[in-house]
Amino acid sequence: MGEIGKIGVVGAGTMGHGIAQVAATSGYEVTLVDVDAGALERGLGAVDRSLGKLVDKGKLAAAERDAARGRLGSSTELAALEGADLVVEAVVERLDVKRQVFAELDRRTAPEAILASNTSSIAITKLAAATGRPDRVIGMHFMNPVPLMQLVEVIRGLATSQATYDAVEAAARRMGKTPVEVHDAPGFVSNRVLMPMINEAAFCLWERVGEAEAIDQVMTLGMNHPMGPLALADLIGLDVCLDVLRVLQEGFGDPKYRPCPLLVKMVDAGHLGRKSGRGFYTY
């Protein structure tokens, strides 16, 4: 398997445009794809603002910003990814949608291309089964916000080859990230530990054990967390948290992963956190 030179990213949301940014800043030729032209425009705008902030803070030279932006192309067609060596899928956290994307990428990309998913909870083996190249399918779970967070969980599916793992690990390191290998289980490590904490914080609020600010202060001041679980849920997106909890509940069949009714109601009401302007807090 040759060295990765061109990277495609599918999905221009918070995670997708962040992945595209760090890949382009690291010297890769990148194509960001989203079927929604408006989402694509917003994603590219977010990249421009993020790069601008890095320049203002002295963490990136203006010339480096311009070079990175010049390496970042965009399209509303998956056909634009035909020459990619690695494609990272970053669409909504739903198995049916991701499987459809992987099946289409399998048809659109070269047989030797690696197909990775930024999924935060869904089994890589299930996604790989939608393709004819399960040995070249892998999980590449970045953390939010992508330009700032160090971790990438790298998840092997049942058939993922060592060559695929090695290539993705090297790509993550070139992007300035620290890859950590975990096994293919619901929620992997990050969300298997994190989401029950967020869910329990929601239960504390629902049962009036404390107000949102008090619950978060207990965790920031008492446990030295940089952000409280309810504020973190708002940053992640309450709909994403709910999707992950449902994957955990279905995957393990254990009632301890049952989503808090308050979380379900908030998502039903469209109170999704920062991205909607209202969640556990108002923005």
Image: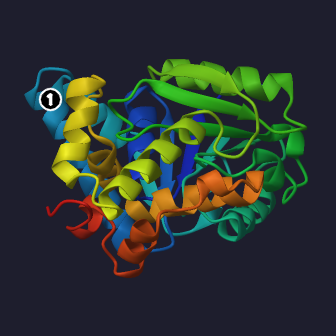
Mark 1 residue element: helix
Quarter containing the C terminus: bottom left
Q: Is residue 36 left or right of residue 93?
A: left
* Position of residue 261 measured from the top left corner of the image (x, y, whole percent): 46, 70
Q: Is residue 57 left or right of residue 239?
A: left
Relative to residue 229, is residue 238 depicted above or below? below
* Position of residue 67 measured from the top left corner of the image (x, y, whole percent): 31, 32
Q: Is residue 85 visible?
A: no
- Residue lying at the far left of the rendered structure: 56
Quarter containing the N terminus: top right
Name the residue located 36 percent from the left edge and 73 percent from the top edge.
266
Relative to residue 125, is residue 138 depicted above or below? above
Name the residue located 90 percent from the left edge and 37 percent from the top edge.
159
For badge 1, the amino acid type reads Val
Image-quadrant location for residue 190: top right
Q: Is residue 34 left or right of residue 162?
A: left
Image-quadrant location for residue 131: bottom right
Relative to residue 217, is residue 168 depicted above or below? above
Name the residue located 61 percent from the left edge and 21 percent from the top edge.
180
Q: Label 1: few (<14), some or many (≥20) within 10 Å? A: some
Name the residue located 34 percent from the left edge and 64 percent from the top edge.
206
Image color mode: rainbow
* Position of residue 57 measured from the top left corner of the image (x, y, whole percent): 10, 25
Q: Is residue 12 visible?
A: yes
Residue 107 versus residue 264: which sits nearer the camera? 264
Relative to residue 154, is residue 95 depicted above or below? below
- The residue at which mark 1 appears reads as 55
